[in-house]
Image (spheres, helix red, strand yellow):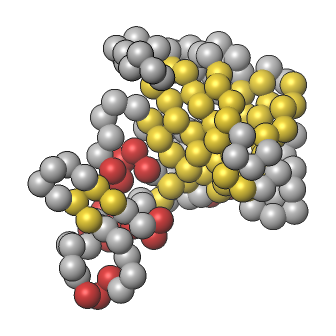
């Protein structure tokens, strides 16, 4: 199986990957700091945080680790993991399970020919498709297409205390 995506997930893996998927890039943390609201040097960048707790970041403002966009870290999320991974043709993210962290994961295929591999079985995800996995199955995400694939991955412990609203 092609693995260029990474030999291991980053330590604070809300689920990242890539050849760049493997080891997080070292970078100057100051360079990842979002620009202040109204900073004209930022041009069309959309960074905005206000006193109500709203944060808006343009894709270029999201911290990166290889091919992972570290959305959770960049937005300062504390309740759940949320990242986007870009997977090169023929690559995959590292195979893993979430038993040690007791995390459910949700995958949203944003672009490309995404294949979710669960316990060795391929499951094609068309763009816009969601998949949910319990903690135990071994999983990886593979790109079988000729172009880049993008997948949003969300995760949270099953014991997070989430209570769905009645209508949801």
**Residue name at image x 71 percent, y 21 percent:** 138
**Residue name at image x 47 percent, y 65 percent:** 59
Q: Position of residue 3 (x, y in %)?
A: 77, 45
Q: Position of residue 2 (x, y in %)?
A: 84, 46
**Residue name at image x 56 percent, y 58 percent:** 66
Quadrant of res 125: top right
* Marker count (numbered): 0
Q: Is residue 30 visible?
A: yes
Q: Position of residue 160 (x, y in %)?
A: 37, 17
**7 displayed left or right of 14:** right
Up-down relation of residue 7 to residue 148 (above or below) = above
Up-down relation of residue 9 to residue 24 (above or below) = above
Q: Is residue 21 visible?
A: no
Quadrant of res 34: bottom left
**Residue name at image x 48 percent, y 23 percent:** 168
**31 displayed left or right of 140:** left
- Given the current orientation, which residue lies at the most extreme front position? 167
Q: Position of residue 153 (x, y in %)?
A: 57, 39
* Nearer the observer, 162 or 59: 162
* Nearer the observer, 17 or 167: 167
Up-down relation of residue 78 to residue 72 (above or below) = above
**9 displayed left or right of 160:** right
């Amino acid at each position: 199986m092609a693995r260029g995506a990474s030999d291991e997930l980053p330590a604070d893996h809300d689920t990242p990957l890539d050849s760049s998927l493997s080891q997080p890039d070292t970078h100057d943390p100051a360079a990842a700091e979002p620009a202040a609201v109204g900073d004209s040097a930022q041009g069309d960048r959309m960074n905005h945080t206000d006193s109500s707790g709203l944060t808006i970041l343009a894709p270029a403002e999201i911290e990166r680790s290889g091919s992972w966009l570290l959305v959770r870290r960049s937005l300062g999320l504390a309740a759940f993991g949320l990242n986007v991974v870009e997977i090169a043709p023929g690559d995959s993210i590292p195979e893993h399970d979430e038993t040690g962290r007791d995390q459910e994961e949700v995958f949203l295929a944003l672009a490309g020919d995404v294949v979710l591999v669960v316990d060795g079985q391929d499951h094609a995800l068309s763009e816009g498709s969601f998949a949910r996995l319990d903690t135990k199955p071994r999983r990886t995400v593979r790109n079988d297409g000729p172009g880049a694939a993008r997948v949003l991955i969300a995760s949270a412990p099953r014991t997070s205390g989430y209570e769905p609203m009645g209508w949801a």
